[in-house]
Amino acid sequence: MSPIKGQDERYITAREVAERVGLSPDTILRYCREGRIPGRRLPGQIRPVRFLWSEIQTVWDGDQQLTMGDAA
């Protein structure tokens, strides 16, 4: 049997996503709040947001992201 896509993938932080796409972690978290990129709130008292890189790659278009209100 072949593994399900993403089954072995680990969750990454906003900082790790930011490093990969060249933005700040605050921008990544804002994009998540605005629904531009998928993220998950994990259970617990603090409820941190985590991301799957495969999901980010699926929806990420740097030029499109910037045209959604970030361009000066």
Image (spheres, helix red, strand yellow):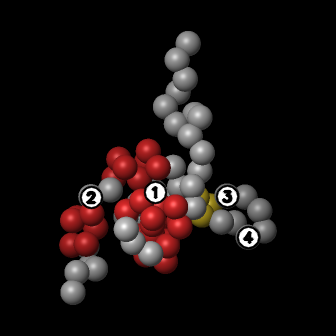
Q: Nearer the viewer, mark 1 or mark 2?
A: 2
Q: Report how far apart the C-alphas of labels 1 and 3 lie in the structure.
A: 13 Å
Residue 30 placed where, x, y %? 45, 75
Residue visible at 25% across and 72% down?
Answer: 66
- Residue 38's disc is 1
Give the SS element for disc 1.
loop
Q: Is residue 60 left or right of residue 38?
A: left
Q: Nearer the viewer, mark 2 or mark 4?
A: 2
How far is the residue under mark 2 from the one under mark 3? 25 Å
Q: Amino acid at mark 4?
A: Ile
Numbered badge on residue 46: 4
- Tell me the mark number nearer the camera, choosing from 2 and 3: 2
Upstream in sequence: badge 2 or badge 4:
4
Q: How many marks?
A: 4
Q: Which residue is mark 2?
A: 61
Decide: few, some or many residues near mark 1? Use Cα within 10 Å; few <14, some 14-19, many ≥20: some
Q: Disc 3 marks which amino acid?
A: Leu
* Residue under numbered circle 3: 42
Q: Residue at x 42, y 59 (%)?
A: 20
Q: Quadrant of residue 9?
A: top right
